Image (tube, rainbow, N blue to C red):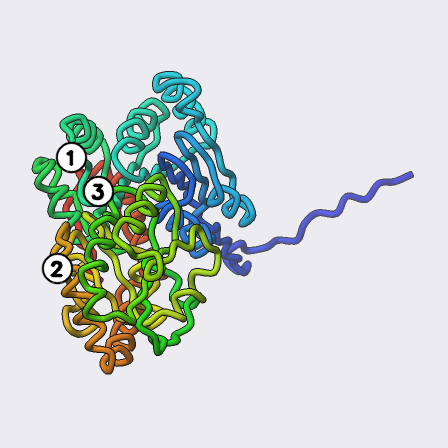
Amino acid sequence: MATTILSPPDVDARTLPVTEVRMEPARKRVCHLSMTLQTGGLERLLVEFGRHHDCGRYELQFVALDLLGPPADELRDLGFEVETMRFSAIGKWTMLRRLAHWLRRERIDILHTHNTYPHFYGTLAARLAGVPVVVNTQHGRGCGSGWKDRCQFRLANRVSQRVVGVSEDARTLCQAQDPRSARRMTRIWNGIDVGRFAFHGPADTLTAISVARLNPVKDFPTLLHGVALAHPQVPEFRLQIVGDGPERPRLEALREKLGLDEVVTFLGERADVPELLSRAGFFVSSSKTEGISLTLLEAMAVGLPVLTTSVGGNPEIVVEGETGRLVEPLNPDAIAAGVVTMCRERPRWEEMGRAGRDRVEQHFEIGRMIRNYEALYEEVVAEAGRGALPTDMNLQQ
C-alpha cells in the first residue's frame, strides 16, 4: 500500500497574521500582620482591606501574632486565609521562626505590618524569608512611648521601605522618633465605608453618645466628671456609652458615686451601632490620644455634630465650629463647658452634621484610603525591582 506524504505549501511567514498573546501580570501576594485579630479599630480596618482591595492585582492573607476573634471570622467568611502564630503559647523566637517559614512557604511579595511589635518581628521574619518589600502602618500616635518601642521601630525601619502614619500628627511624631528614616514616612488617613452609614442627621434629643472600648486611653472618668459638672446647667442632658472593656466596673462605680445613674447608661457591646448613632443628638469622645478615630468618622457619616478632645488626629477630622467642637484633654471643666456649648448650639446641629458628612465623604472614604495604599505598594515594588534606595513620598489626599 502506497503512502502519500503531503508536503506543506510554500508559505511566506511574513504574510501570516500575528496573534498577540497578552499575559496578565501575576497578582502580588500581600500579608497583613497585626498583633491580634480581636475587636478593635485596627482590626476593623483590616476587614475593610479585605472587602475593598483590588482583587485583580492583589491576593491578601492575614496573620496575627497572637489571639483571634470576630474580625478573623469575618475575614474567613469573606474567603481569606487567616493564621495565628500563637505567640503567647510558643514564645517570641519560636514564633519568629514559624512566621519566617510561613512567609517563605506562601511566597509573600509585600509584608504590611501594623504597629510596632508586629513591625519589628515581621521585619526580622521577612529578612529570613526573603520577602522583598515591607510596609508599616502606625495606627496611634507614633511608635509608642517606651525606649524599647523606639529601638524596635528604628531597627525595623532600616530594612523596610515605608512607614505610614494614619494622621499628620502621627507622621510627625514618627519622624521625631526616627529622624534617620523620616524621608520614608508618609501619611494616609484612615477611612470608613461611608455607604454603610445612611445620613440621618442629629435626632431631636439632648442625648449624646460615645462609642469606644472601655480602657484607660479613652479616659471615660474625665467624661463622667465633666457630665457631672455640666448636668446642673442642662438637666435634660443624657449620655449613652457603647462598648465594653476592663474599665467598665470602675466606671459604673464612678457613675454611682457622681449621682449619674439616671443620666449615664452603659449599653455594652452592640452590633447596631449605626442605628444607635442615628438616635443621638451629638457624639462625644474624651480620649487622651488618638490616631484617626473610626467611631468619630462613623458618627460624622451619620450626620452627628461631635464634641471631642484636641488630641492626635482629631483636629484633622473635626473643623472647630463647623463640624463640632474640640476641647482640651484630661480636663473635666473643658468637657463640661463643651457639653453645655453643644446643648446650647442645638439649632446648628443639622448644619454641623451635614458639614461633617461632606468632610468624611471627601477625605475619609475607605476606597480612597485603600487606593492610596495600593499606589504606595506599586511604588515600593518598583523601587525594589530597580534596586533603588527608598525615597520620600507624600500622598496628598
Q: Tell which of 192 and 282 is nearer to you.
A: 282
Q: Disc number at residue 334?
A: 2
Against 314, residue 390 (above or below) is above
Type of residue at label 1?
A: Ser
Q: What separation in Å lies between label 1 and label 3 (alpha carbons)?
A: 17 Å
Label 3: element kind: strand
Residue 65: x and y, percent? 39, 30
Q: Indicate which label's residue lies in the foreground, 2 or 1.
A: 2
Which residue is label 1 attached to? 145
Q: Quadrant of residue 245?
A: top left
Q: Nearer the viewer, residue 146 or 202?
A: 202
User: Does the CB distance between marks 3 and 2 fall below 8 Å?
Assistant: no
Q: Please state which of the two labelled residues, at mark 3 or mark 2, is closer to the viewer.
A: 2
Label 3 crowding class (10 Å Cα cut-off): few <14, some 14-19, many 20+? many
Residue 26 seen in the figure? no
Which is nearer the N-term, disc 1 or disc 3?
1
For residue 366, which quarter of the picture? bottom left
Give the residue type at disc 2.
Answer: Ala
Please report contact status of discs 2 and 1: CB closer than 8 Å, yes or no: no
Question: For this rendering, which residue is in front, 8 or 348?
Answer: 348
Q: Amino acid at mark 3?
A: Val
Please identify the residue farthest to the right as the structure is shown: 1
Of label 2 and label 1, which has the lower sequence position?
1
How far across and how far down the image is residue 4, in percent? 81, 44
Q: Is residue 33 left or right of residue 338?
A: right
